[in-house]
Amino acid sequence: MQNIQPRSIQVHPSDNVAIVVNEGGLPAGTVFESGLVLKEGVPEAHKVALTAIPKGAAVIRYGVVIGRAVREIPAGSWVHEGILTLPQAPALDQLPSPREDQQFLPPLEGFTFEGYVNDDGTVGTKNILGISTTVQCVSATVEYAVKKIKAELLPYYSNVDDVIAITHPYGCGIAIDAPGAEIPIRTLRNLSLNPNLGGAPMVVSLGCEKLQPSRMLPSDTLPVLTTQSYVVRLQDEEHRGFGDMVQAIMSMAEERLRKLNQRRRVTRPASDLIVGLQCGGSDAFSGVTANPAVGYAADLLVRAGATVMFSEVTEVRDAVDLLTSRAASKEIADGLAREMEWYDRYLQQGAVDRSANPSPGNKSGGLTNIVEKALGSIVKSGTSPIRGVFGPGERVTTKGLVFAATPASDFVCGTLQLAASMNMHVFTTGRGTPYGLAMVPVIKVASRTALAERWFDLIDVDAGTIATGKATIQEVGEEIFRLILDVASGRKQTCADRWGLHNEFALFNPAPIT
Ligand code: CA
């Protein structure tokens, strides 16, 4: 222990706390190079007071007040949840206006990837047959059929990467015309139209359900390819027994596989990428290592013309005043406030607020409260102006950096980002999660080297090297950018894809069920 160099990271010059870098934390009596002596043991990633903080005074990290001291905090103390109050979230009617002097970084030319071009102009990073369902009642049947398709048909269509069943608990027993019901409905619609599904949607319906195929996927949203027949309805009289139903699904699937199989990757500009950013299982390092590196990559992507979306409303809410000034227009700033307001009301209905967000693991990882978590989370968005705001499950139609409003819950957010047209996903984690999605490749970035080493076959990028001084934010950011292009092209595989770790879809349904 005595040979270990004590290390801490102070993010902003005005911060009066820093986080402890050393694995396993540091004991009482540790002396830092600055002369600061630890009054008590401070766990790894947790905060230490750099100066004495009087009772009622602001505790500052990222240059922002993350709380106030409930008692005097001597220099060298462990600053944790129990001795901080939670500040009010920024008032939504007093948010800063967009800055006039916003810097557009110079465009980056010449970056490409190899993708599958769809009729609607979108580009896939995988070539997948997706089989949508209107209702939970058909899920088991579709999953049975998909198992058979994978075993008996897919081997003959070697240019098709996968066959996936888009199953969910929605579709019946629901208040389908309630405000908010459009969210799960458009999510299911837009999932079927994700660029990685090749514009070849097919739908399996039961027949008597509330969410009819024509409502889920109206004909004007269907690609040319499938306007003829795209629905297998299990209650149709032509199906005699289970075998007939499975056969009908397999026949339509084979038609689709034949078409998908003719497609080849072609060179496309990086501007065809739609990259969704998310974090899950964050710790106090996330905001200084993984998320800034992803933010750097986000800026490179935006400069190369791509769409980059960030999400997770409860992890944006407390820092929204830092984002409205980055909106490209007044309408976009208003859009951000509108999505925050909608979510405030949604949480109120459940008798909670955004403070319900941090998990026990976030807290053991040094994140005291939602303010600190949000400040670390929005760093993923980089520095570009925000060019668009989209509601949950809406398709993103703007290039550049956009905000796609979603809950922060990992699978709900991932599902909504897929509906928004995401074709690449970057996911940062500090505590560690084996998260993966079948529809798009997920690049996982660890905030700590200890995690990246322990989970050597689950983590794609180690951003912990930024904390230990072995690499810069710029270097790791460039590594992530290059890896996105390689994975999008099928040249490299993510850890999650190597193991086939594909979590289930999780719909966001804020409307009543009946
Ligand atoms: Ca999340």
Image (tube, helix red, strand yellow):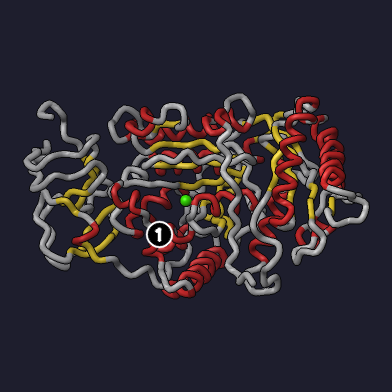
Camera-nearest residue between 473 and 108: 473
Is 425 on the left or on the right of 462, as rendered? right
Query: Is 352 situated above or below 310?
Result: below
Looking at the rendered structure, the number of numbered marks drawn on it comes to 1
Query: x%, y% of residue 440?
Result: 62, 39
Q: Residue at x 34, y 50 (%)?
A: 362
- Quarter of the image with the N terminus in it: top left
Q: Tell me where residue 186 sits by quadrant.
A: bottom right
Query: Is 455 situated above or below 191?
Result: above
Is 200 on the left or on the right of 88, as rendered? right
Q: What residue is pinned by disc 1? A: 357
Q: In the orientation shown, which residue stands out farthest toward the front?
A: 241
Q: Residue at x 37, y 42 (%)?
A: 431
Residue 62 appears in the rendering: no
Query: x%, y% of residue 455?
Result: 41, 30
The residue tagged with tag 1: helix, strand or loop? loop
Is 217 on the left or on the right of 88, as rendered? right
Q: Residue at x 73, y 39 (%)?
A: 146
Query: x%, y% of residue 116?
Result: 73, 34
- Quarter of the image with the C terminus in it: bottom right
Q: As shown in the figure, which amino acid type bears the numbered disc 1?
A: Asn
Classify mark 1 as within 8 Å of ligand 1 or not, answering yes or no. no
Residue 88 appears in the rendering: yes
Camera-nearest residue between 197 and 58: 197
Query: Is 500 situated above or below 234?
Result: above
Q: Residue at x 69, y 48 (%)?
A: 166
